[in-house]
Amino acid sequence: MPLAYDRHWLLTWTTYGTWLPGDARGFVSPISRESEHGKWTRENRPGVAYDQDLPERLEQSRQLLKGAPVFLRLPQAELLLGQFGETAIHRGWGLLAAAVMRAHAHLVVGVTGDPEPDALLRDFKAYGSRALNRRFSRPESGTWWTEGGSRAVCGSAGKGFSGLGGCGVGLSAGGEWR
């Protein structure tokens, strides 16, 4: 594994059903709406303000769930940490930091070249799901994760990785283990 990477990514995603459109904490959703200027704008773009606290939308989202929300337990988180390390090694990436919480995960990944960040996110989630499915019962919904996730650049060639502050975001704790 290289000691220097061309780019560093902060990947974040949530477990299934734990952060729905309409949530009071705010949410990003692939919806469009008419702006004050009469133009339709897509709501899930960088720089667009988050929607938040829409109780009707939240209830509608709950009705569409295919199963109970997924909250990870400690043995599942430990399994995922190991699997994320294996995935990084298999792909030639560097897993520089990882946090698996009850309802979401954060990874800081160093890469050479310029792979698509969607591919990084997809691979970590897919290999993580396979590991969970082999050892634990598949969730009622059929999936461990929500669709998509966040991909933020933390540093690129010449800049290096100087900790999570270089990602331009802050991380917060996601609850106690049960």
Image: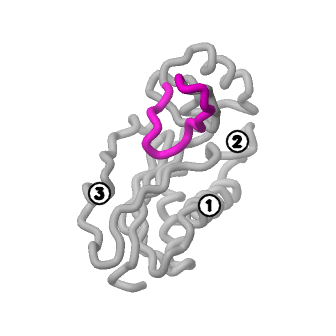
For the residues marked 2 and 3, what is the alpha-carbon distance in whole angstroms?
Answer: 32 Å
Amino acid residing under circle 2:
Pro
Of residues 50 and 150, the one drawn nearer to the viewer in this rendering:
50
Using the image, tell me which numbered label, if any, was put on residue 164. 3
Of residues 71 and 38, the one drawn nearer to the viewer in this rendering:
38
> Where does residue 158 sit, x and y in percent of width and height?
28, 78
Identify the image quadrant of the N terminus. bottom left
Q: Which of the two labelled residues, at mark 2 and mark 3, occupies the earlier sequence position?
A: 2
Is disc 1 surrounded by few (<14), some (14 to 19) or many (20+) residues within 10 Å?
some
For residue 3, side relative to residue 132 (left or right): left
Is disc 2 surrounded by few (<14), some (14 to 19) or many (20+) residues within 10 Å?
some
- What are the residue bounds of the magenta stretch? 36-51
User: Magenta span has 144?
Assistant: no
Residue at horizontal 47 percent and vertical 51 percent from the top? 12
Using the image, tell me which numbered label, if any, was put on residue 122. 1
> Where does residue 169 sit, x and y in percent of width and height?
32, 48
Q: Which residue is mark 2?
A: 139
